[in-house]
Image (tube, rainbow, N blue to C red):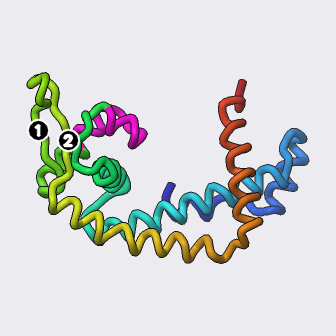
Amino acid sequence: MDNQQLHTFPNHQDLVDLQKRIPQLDVPSMEIIFILLKTVGELSNAFHTYLSDYGLSQGKMKILLQLYKDSGKGLLPSELAICSGVTRGTITGLIDGLEKDGYVERIHHKNDRRMVMVKITSLGAELTEKVLPKHFLDVKKLIDHISVPEQESLMNILRKLLAEIPTMHS
């Protein structure tokens, strides 16, 4: 969702007017969802901007993080796809780009040469160690504006919302 879409959400009065025509519309519910969508969109844009300064996308950074925490053992592309929440086709393109940049390498599996493992290179590990500390500090700075009890409440609320999503439209 781009910035222009974020600013096209109906305002409070628009929702009140729409509720007159569609009584099922609950104004507070829709306002909560709109602010949540706007927040997620703005966070995604901020992450994108920061990572693009290093030539990375969020998808590539997820892969580097998975491989970095893997401590050099390597993962199958299918495992990376699952960890990253993308399709196998998408993971191939992400790995190709990271390999081209020298951040990962494909290595044949020691027991089955038909299988390929993906490992982070020293250059990939260096980049990860350069990118993540500032990113983590920025996220902490953002969350520090919320008290610990508010953080716990927010986590509980978000978990409840997440658990209810599969029941939508059923």
Q: Quadrant of residue 6?
A: bottom right
Q: Residue at x 26, y 38 (%)?
A: 75
Q: Nearer the viewer, residue 69 or 160?
A: 69
Q: Quadrant of residue 86?
A: top left
Type of amino acid at the residue the image marks with label 2: Val
Q: Nearer the viewer, residue 38 or 18?
A: 38
Q: Which residue is mark 2?
A: 118
Locate residue 45, reporting x and y percent: 46, 64
Q: Residue at x 69, y 50 (%)?
A: 158
Using the image, determine if residue 55 lies above or below residue 23: below
Task: Decide if residue 112 is on the left or right side of residue 93.
Answer: left
What's the magenta region? 79-93
**Does the magenta segment cover residue 80?**
yes
What distance separates the C-alpha of mark 1 from that of mark 2?
A: 6 Å
Q: Which residue is mark 1?
A: 107
Type of amino acid at the residue the image marks with label 1: Ile
Do labels 1 and 2 touch, CB within 8 Å? yes
Q: Nearer the viewer, residue 113 or 168?
A: 113
Q: Nearer the viewer, residue 142 or 17?
A: 142
Q: Residue at x 18, y 36 (%)?
A: 117
Please, what secondary structure does the residue beneath circle 1 have? strand
Please, what secondary structure does the residue beneath circle 2 have? strand
Classify the position of the C terminus by image quarter: top right
**Does the magenta segment cover residue 87?**
yes
Q: What secondary structure is the magenta-colored segment mainly?
A: helix
